[in-house]
Image (cartoon, rainbow, N blue to C red):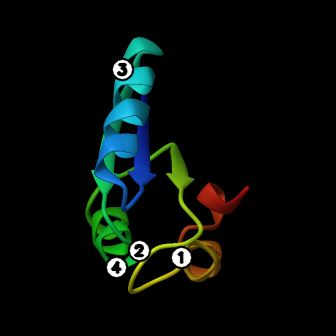
């Protein structure tokens, strides 16, 4: 099973993505913004990230740049 982090500030859309990933035999986890995502990335291991681009606090693009530096295997 793949552990996937969903970074999405729209809770309804995050719920839909969570449901879809469950059906694809993944273990989804959610973060409402980039700051929360970075905290989760430092604590847990993920196989993939699905990320919104326009979010409060830290944009998806800024999150990607941070992931490139700190978790390069996830940036591929």
Q: Is residue 10 left or right of residue 53?
A: left
Q: Position of residue 41 (x, y in %)?
A: 37, 64
- Above-or-below relation of 27 to 13: above
Q: Position of residue 26 (x, y in %)?
A: 41, 24
Q: Of the numbered discs in the image, which one, if any, rests on residue 22?
A: 3
Question: Which of the 4 image quadrants contains residue 52?
Answer: bottom right
Label 1 – label 3 distance at C-alpha = 24 Å
Residue marked by disc 1: 63
Determine whether label 2 and label 1 are within 8 Å by CB: yes
The tag earlier along the polypeptide, 3 or 2, is: 3
- SS type, badge 1: helix
Looking at the figure, which quarter contains the C terminus? Answer: bottom right
- SS type, badge 3: helix
Residue marked by disc 4: 35
| Label tally | 4
Label 4 – label 1 distance at C-alpha = 8 Å
């Amino acid at each position: 099973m793949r552990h996937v982090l969903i970074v999405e500030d729209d809770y309804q859309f995050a719920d839909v993505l969570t449901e879809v990933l469950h059906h694809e035999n993944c273990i989804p986890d959610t973060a409402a913004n980039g700051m929360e995502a970075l905290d989760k990335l430092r604590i847990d291991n993920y196989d993939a990230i699905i990320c919104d681009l326009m979010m409060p606090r830290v944009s998806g693009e800024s999150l990607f740049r941070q992931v490139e530096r700190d978790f390069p295997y996830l940036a591929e």
